[in-house]
Amino acid sequence: MISESSSPAVIALSGLTLRRGTRTVLADLTLQVAAGEIYALLGGNGAGKSTTLSVLLGFLRPDGGTVTVAGTDPVTAPDAARRQIAFLPESVALYDQLSAYENIAYFMALTGHEPTRGAMDGALDAAGLQAEARTRRVGGYSKGMRQKVAIAMAVLRDVPVLLLDEPTSGLDPRATADFNALLGRLKARGTAILMVTHDLLGAADCADRIGFLAEGRIVDEVRPADGIDVLALHHRYGEAAAA
Amino acid sequence: MGPGVIGLWRHELRLFLRQPMALPLLLLVVLLSAGSVWAGLAEVAHQREVIARIQPQQAADVAAVAASAAADGDPGNAAYYTHHVTWDPPSDLAFIALGQRDVAPFVLRVRALALEGQINESETYNAELALPGRFDWAFVLTYLAPLFAIALLHDLVASEREAGRLALLGAMARSRRGLWARRALLRSGLLFAALTLPLIVGGLIANSGWALLGVIGLAAAYLAFWTLACLAAAWLRLGSVSAAAALAAVWLIVTLVLPGLALVAINAAIPVRQGVELTLAQREAVHGGWDKPKPATMAAFFRAEPAWRNTAPVRGGFHWKWYYAFQHLGDLSVAEPVRAYRAGLERRDALTRQVGYVLPPVGLQLALHRLARTDLQAQLAYQDRIRAYHAQLRRFYYGYLFTDRPFQAADFARAPRWPEPPPQP
Amino acid sequence: MKTVRLLAGNDWRLMARSRVAQLALLMLLALSIVAAVTAVAHRDDSNALRARFQQQADRAFDGQPARHPHRMVHYGHFVFRPLPALAGFDPGVDGFTGNTIFLEGHRQNSANFGDVRQSSLLARFGQLTPAFVLQALAPLVLIFVGFGLIANERERGTLRLLRVHGRSAAEVLGGKLLALGGIAAVLLTPALAALIWLVASARAEPLAAGLLALGYIGYLALWVLGIVIVSALVRSARGALIALLGLWTLTTILVPRIGPDIALRLEPQLTRLETDIAIQRDLQRLGDSHNPDDPHFAAFKARILAQYGVSRVEDLPLNYRGLVALEGERLTASLFDRYATAQFAQQRRQGTIATRLGLLSPAVAIRSLSMALAGTDLEGHRRFLQQAEAYRYGIVQRLNRLQAETVTYVDDGNRNRDPEAARRVRIDPRHWQEVPDFTYRPASLAERLAAAAPGAGILLVWLGLAAAAAVAAIRRLEETV
């Protein structure tokens, strides 16, 4: 069932195993994401979604298996791997005492970049943050606005890999559509995008492939482009997804 | 295209200073540090002024003695009534750590009589004011700086975790270790600057010279210790509240509790009652001198001071030669308890130094007071200088007594002077 | 009330499960016990040692052989300041003052051999005594145990839950006060036991000990109130902890140090050396017994001769040298008194400035109250200095009178030339034995109570302010939850 993508993989997990105490969180997880591909990893709470992202970011050390991110190994060279990755966390927390521009400038400086005001505006335009809010301190922002700032940072990073953690959970339908359009542009730029989510409908809208994660392994994989029965899938995996 | 190292630090600085408590805390540190430096400088200036202002008073006192009690030219009277002033000027670094100079005399007058009854004289001071200790820079650094370091650094990582930014920061930073090191260094560095800038200004005013670098180095090492303690709390993944509580408890234990226990232990292990004992014994020895046969007393004295062996013998009921001889023999009779007393004090000091190797606040205080020359060692060194000066004085008067030379008005100015020049206030 | 007990009981259960609270409490209890045991032992040892030295000095004085009385004036005497019983609880300034004075004619020596000059710098870190533990450390432990009492409940949302279940804000606050007050009571027990022990074993006055206990109960009650109020008013537990630690540092560490500096700056004191010179200078002006032309002593001589109706001092029924010694000592002693009075007055002014600053810090107030009740404040040392000086003057004048009455003028003048005269001027040693021994009269209970009043007053003001703040906190709790 698990298919290989046609072009060479930018993200590659193979036989990934990770235990926490006696509990097995990831059990022989294998998946690959190619450049210009959007892969959605679907699963309920505790299925291992966030753990997978943590391994890719080099925050967690797996007990077995191999990981490759844009030619680097996050296990042995986490800093090098993270330099290839843009990451959008589930609930975006920024520095409340800084403005959107200042937050972006700060976080980009951490990655070693100093974007111009014009570049920041371009990214914020793409993320859809209204211009008049950009100089205000983000302490007064809504959850969606914060997320847009984080998306703008991901755009500015211009790296081969983008990891998304529940990206559309804070967005209204209109913003979700804008976000999906943005993902399309990044995909066209050749970015390998891995998102974890429990929102099957959202995933079906933008992903090239959807992997169903349960008990630490991928139990099913579908291509929305091939035409899928979302309702049936929802019934089959919905219980885990809704939990 | 990259922001470079400087740019990153600038960003961190802006981020830190935008925190609501950061700037007020740093300003408070500057204020406390400046206040303590000012208080120290004022106290040192006061001590210098005291030493300067006693000079004319002392000169008038000697002139009065020359004009009345010792006007008869008898060197015995001159030696008996003339007090000689000694002083221990504060060092150029004393303003940072005033130490024992508030409870131990820094000006003391001695006569050519038995010294042991004079050298342990105490200064007039208000004990209730001395009890809590002085507000000097050493206090600010030893006691308050760690609390500020804890306030600024206890939630270095915990605050990011609790705010939910940890994953994003971790994903963006080129090196996570570098990020925390940079932030810890920035915060402790700002604290260090806030503490030491007033110190440096004070050092320039007081002309402290290169020794100030030693003080600054100690401050850096001490702050590094507390920064590492805060990093340890982060490494243990303590929450911000637990970290603050745990670090404050560590502060309490190493700056108040363990030094208190160490003091109890050291004073119990090394009792120094010889001070009182030797004073009682010396008084018996000196006054016993009146009743001892004069030839025996003089023979014993000449064994100690052979230079005057072949001078005219003492005859009659009373002679100053004999009087000064048994005064000196009184001192010699307690030489052993004096040595034991001093050894006891030094032993206590040595044990405290060993405690200082383990407890950073104690070690810091000892080092600062050593650099400032305001510790027990400095006190004992002053006493040694007094002893040497007293020996000079005795021999000066012996020169008149034992050769039966009259002591004229002009001779008062010939008496040995305290070797150090009085400071200009 | 039942609700308040119920709420407090719940908090105690939580504390019993918290390792931080357990550790802090156990550590402080252990420390209190160590402090109480060592302080009581130290007081007993020091007092016994001083009593032994005093006996030795008394024996030496009484055991002097037949002598010229003036020899005894210079032989002098040693007196030692005994330690009050409650010094085992709060030694106060004892370690910072000398405890022995050498008394002799025409000189006023200093009290020497204070512990602080004989100890290393560690003495300046604070002495571990029951008083220090209660003044400085117990509030900190209460802060660690209590900063989150309300703030934590607010953060967890359980505070809202309690209010929804019909508990009034006053009941919540009351429960927390009772919970933390219970901890404070536990912290107090070793110190109270030490006080009871001192009453039983060293005959400390029960009233003074009881008031001392009451003072510390008031002081810790103030901290309990303050901690619960801050915990109720500050939004986060972390904020409450930082605010309380700041408050503690300010009141217990900083203000007590800044006060003395301000007092000394406003009232700089003369060094002992300057006082000595000034006394010498004034003495020269009053009358110089060495100067045959001195107007004061010339007038004195004329007055004495007229009084006895004779024209030569040799014809006086008393030894004129003794009379001059009496007059000389009277002059010097009057100067000593004048300078000592001025110095004590200045020290009192310094103390007043420091106590006024105590308004900023309950720790300064409780320290002053504690030392005053224990009899270990500066006033106690002053009493010792004054009584020692009175005793010195008494002995010296007694000996001078002996010289005037039992030694003839002629013998006195010839004692260095004529061995027979020298024998005759040595008077019977029973005279020394008749000199009464020095007994230190400690401050009466009434005097100590008066000395403790300012500290007690400041504490009461603070308690009043804290009670008002508690009412405000209840109102805030009712509005915000």
Image (cartoon, rainbow, N blue to C red):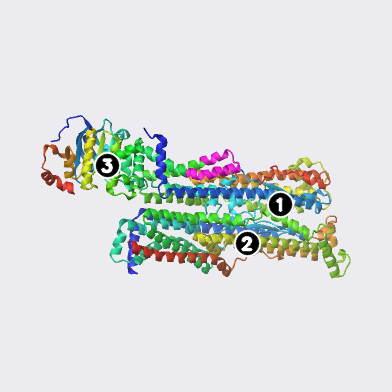
Return the x and y of residue B221 as percentages of the image width and height: 48, 41
In the foreground, B244 or A175: A175
The N terminus of chain B, quarter of image: top left
On residue B285, the disc is: 1
On residue A127, the disc is: 3
Identify the chain of the residue marked 3, using the numbered disc in the image: A
- Element at badge 2? helix
Q: Mark yes or no: residue B182 visible.
A: yes
Q: Is residue A153 depicted above or below B53 in this figure? A: above
Q: Callout 2 environment at 10 Å: few (<14), some (14 to 19), or many (20+)? A: some
Cβ atoms at labels 3 and 1 below 8 Å apart: no
Q: Mark yes or no: residue C67 visible.
A: no
Q: Is residue C400 depicted above or below B116 in this figure? A: below
Return the x and y of residue C71 as percentages of the image width and height: 76, 58
- Element at badge 1? helix
Cα separation between marks 2 and 3: 80 Å
Residue hosting label 2: C382
Which residue corresponds to the image point at 23% horizontal and 47% vertical from the top-left? A169
Question: Would residue B397 be found to the left or right of residue A50 on screen?
Answer: right
Return the x and y of residue C219 as percentages of the image width and height: 47, 63
Return the x and y of residue B197 as percentages of the image width and height: 52, 43
Q: How many callouts does the rendering have? A: 3
Q: Amino acid at mark 1?
A: Ala
User: For the residues carrying marks 1 and 2, which lies nearer the camera in this image?
Assistant: 2
Q: Amino acid at mark 3?
A: Ala
Identify the chain of the residue marked 2, using the numbered disc in the image: C
* Region of the chain picked out in magenta, as a range: B191-217
Q: Quadrant of residue C289?
A: bottom right
